[in-house]
Amino acid sequence: MGPPQDEPVNTAAHDEFLRLFTSVQPALRRFVGYHFPSGREQEIEDVLQETALVLWRKFGQYDPGKSFTSWALGVAHFELRHSQRARARAPLALDERTSDLLARRSAELSPGSERRRNTLDRCLSKLDPRSREALSLYYEKGLSTQQIAEAFRGTANMVRILLFRTRQSLARCMMSAARQEAGGMG
Amino acid sequence: MSDPSAGRSPEDWVALYLEGRIPPGEEAAFNAWVQSNPENVDLLIQQLDVHGSLKSQFEKASLRSTGRIRLAGRGRGTRRRATWNESRSWLGAAAVVLLGLAIVAVLWKAEPQVRPAPEPVTRREPPRPEPEPTLALPAPPPVPAPKPLDPAPKKEETPLPVPPPAAAPEPILPEPPPPKPDRTIVAVAELRDVKGVVLVEQAGQRRPAKPAQGLSAGEGIVTVGKDAFAVIVFPDGTSVELRGETELRNLSVDKGKRLFLARGTLDASVAKQPPERPMAIETPQAEAKVLGTTLRLHVDARAESTLLEVDEGKVRLTRTTDQKALDVAAGSGALAERGIELKAKPLPKTSLAMAFEDAGTARVQFGKIVAGPKRPGSRGCLAGLDVPDDRLTRVILGDARSGLLRLRDGAVLTFDYWVAEKVEALDVYVWDKTQQASIGGTSLLSLTKEKWTRVTIPFSDFESRTGQRLQDGDLITELTIQTGGTNGGGPLFVDNVDVTVVRKK
């Protein structure tokens, strides 16, 4: 199916690769981002680029009868480890087993995840002002939970719990909104 | 069996992981906690997904509501630049580039390279000693050269299918140098007041702008970053101000001034234009022709729609998809969007007037209509409700669907309040849906106690704790008034909440 190394480029394979790759790239970015939640954007970009290269080079070995998402996440999982070793970077907090669990579960959850993301706006508007302000301070202004706690005259632990529960509420709301949308479309 | 959570709560683990602060030596415990229960995996994915979405959301808030054109007026620009999100589908671009490279490599072997012919020489440009550096925009990052992978088989185990290693990549061919320009620039406008990162775009090439630089037909201006600012001035005095993340393309004056706003915000002060040569401002969805009037255009890039609002005069709006045209008169607006009938509607509110007599209102989201402390001529007011967790008393007025009002420069908030003796301060803040931010006014500390008092606060004074300010055109969906200070809540009554606009002359 895909082009073996050193053979002329097959236009149909290009098209197919592009189609599959485009569909999987949000899931790839999300999965790689799982390993760098507090930033390290350059490392995310490096891993994504290397993953893209490997996926293209090995596209000929991809079995069309299987999930491209699972295959791509598997490659990303591998590249994450390889990249950290090859570049002598700080080790990842997620070990291989956890990373593998996330890759597998992520592949299962991937369908519909973009639809869920699209409902975030609506769900944010349903939050109470305090939660929204906490989110804004944390995500937009980059304040730490300790700094937010000072602004709120509370404790860092209180802010962590507030953020955790707010994310949980948002997740539930997004899930419900996406389900409604899907129902409406059907 | 040992406790896999190591005594930490899920909130703790998630917070520590998201902040990259898992204490040294506790990584194994964290991984054990995740692996101990499939629900923990789902919980971590849920938190990471929302975490990633929120990062993107807050970073690209400004870009979602991009593309505001305003004529005859000025505003502040405090929007942020997106740094990473899915709107930058650089991976797609990377794939295209990779495929392109592969195709080029194959073609290179088969055929001699053909260089593009230089553009026809139509104008002469003053000689440049050195080509100026081209700046990259904060859009898809460039794709570096493919890096050779380890040719040895990678022995790392992975439960998911991993293809065998690949051979070394194809070498990347150098791009042919661009043809040297040999043109004469006929300036049709001048760039003034350049601040921050401002680029001039010509035929896909971008270079830093200079103050007082002449602009020729076909050129565009890109302002990068929230503090970027530039003004284009035409010979007849018409000026166009760009700010924030804005991209203006294809400056033209052949059949009247013509601009294309791809994204961002512009304010323009337009001199009277000849009837046969109106100034045209295009967006991806529509075109507005201006003969000397006051209008506002909002381009929502995600919804692929353009909203026109006309304050004075009349504007002809043409939807580009079907060329359907509509004259929009003063005080009206029209939405150009595929599949929606093109018709004029009354403008969104820019003012607010709420009294709380007898009956409730759907806009009271938090609070209770009561008789309240007596006053001549008033039968009711809005009483604040206690929020024990936050030790304060609060009222919230809101309209999440349509919004309370669209903010205009010069808007002020006025309301009556009555507070108990122990209340130390009043805080007022709004939810700015456009910026997705909660932004508050200065705390009112010199309160008159236990007596109805009217207070006025300019929205220009509103600022979040981190410096974010309200902007002209922002949609306000909630207004909160609450007690502040350290004494906790106390009786609070509010009435006659008004927002009015003090127009500039």
Image (cartoon, helix red, strand yellow):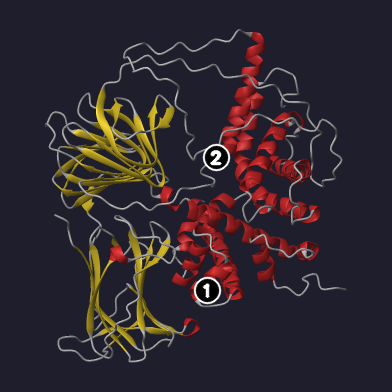
Which mark, by number, is residue B89? Answer: 2
On the rendered structure, is B320 left or right of B312? right
On the rendered structure, is B34 left or right of B178? right
Which mark, by number, is residue B272? Answer: none
Label 1 is found on which chain of the structure?
A
In the depicted structure, whether residue B422 falls above or below residue B86: below
Crowding around mark 2 (Cα neighbors within 10 Å: few <14, some 14 to 19, many 20+) is: some
Question: Which of the 4 image quarters holds residue A12?
Answer: top right
The spot of residue A159 in percent (x, y) is: 57, 72
**Most foreground residue, B50 or B229:** B229
**Most foreground residue, B302 or A147:** A147
Which kind of residue does numbered mark 1 sit on? Glu
- Tell me if residue B340 can be seen: no
Q: Gap in Å between the C-alphas at discs 1 and 2?
A: 37 Å
| Discs 1, 2 touching: Cβ within 8 Å | no
Q: Do callouts 1 and 2 point to residues on the same chain?
A: no
The structure residue drawn at horizontal position 79% and vertical position 55%, both measured from the top left corner, is A95
The spot of residue B437 in percent (x, y) is: 42, 62
**Most foreground residue, B79 or A124:** B79
Which mark, by number, is residue A150? Answer: 1
Count of numbered marks:
2
On the rendered structure, is A73 left or right of B493? right
Label 2 is found on which chain of the structure?
B
Which kind of residue does numbered mark 2 sit on? Ser
The spot of residue B67 in percent (x, y) is: 35, 44
Quick one: SS at disc 2? loop
In the depicted structure, whether residue B475 falls above or below residue B302: below
The structure residue drawn at horizontal position 49% and vertical position 13%, both measured from the top left corner, is B116
Question: Which of the 4 image quarters holds residue A84?
Answer: top right
In the displayed orientation, state which residue is furthest to the top. B112
